[in-house]
Image (cartoon, rainbow, N blue to C red):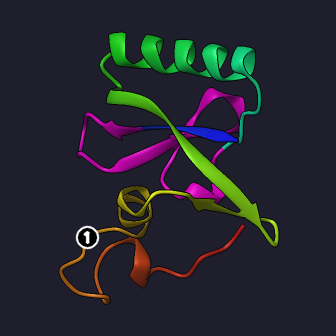
Amino acid sequence: MKVITANRLLNGDVVWLGAGKTWVERITLAEVFDGTDAVADALAVGAAAEKNQEVVGVYEMDVAVEDGVIVPVRLRERIRAAGPTTHPNLGKQAQAVSA
């Protein structure tokens, strides 16, 4: 299983491709893609958004779904999903999670 991630060009925030080809700021709202064709189609959406200068650095990342929650497989991606590692009261980890 994969999700598509990038950084929003306007403010640098980490974003994920969500339903309706929109970019969302919470990994819990990301659309999960399974299969080579689905991932390729999603990457094409990301490439178009990159061309339109909405996002930069589009790539696929491995995820697992645990108890209905999307969880990044790699540590690097867990950090990106949680926000800055400077202080637990800052970034996405300080916000309430819902979805």
Q: Give the residue number, with chain letter if any, for mark 1.
A: 84
Give the side of residue 64 with respect to residue 96, left or right: right
Crowd rating for badge 1 (residues with CA inside 10 Å; few <14, some 14–19, many 20+)? some
Q: Is residue 25 above or below residue 47?
A: below
Q: Quadrant of residue 68?
A: bottom right
Q: Residue at x 70, y 19 (%)?
A: 36
- The quarter of the rendered structure image containing the C terminus is bottom right
Q: Residue 95: horizontal and vertical position, in percent?
A: 46, 79
Residue 1 part of the magenta segment: no
Residue range in magenta is 6-30
**Viewport quadrant of the N terminus:** top right
In the image, what residue occupies the spot 40% across and 71% down? 92
Q: Position of residue 28 (x, y in %)?
A: 64, 60
Residue type at tag 1? Pro
Q: Position of residue 70 (x, y in %)?
A: 67, 60
Nearer to me, 42 or 9: 42
**Residue extending furthest toward the right:** 67
Q: What residue is drawn where x is 40% and y is 83%?
A: 94
Give the side of residue 48 with respect to residue 30, left or right: left
Q: Quadrant of residue 55?
A: top left
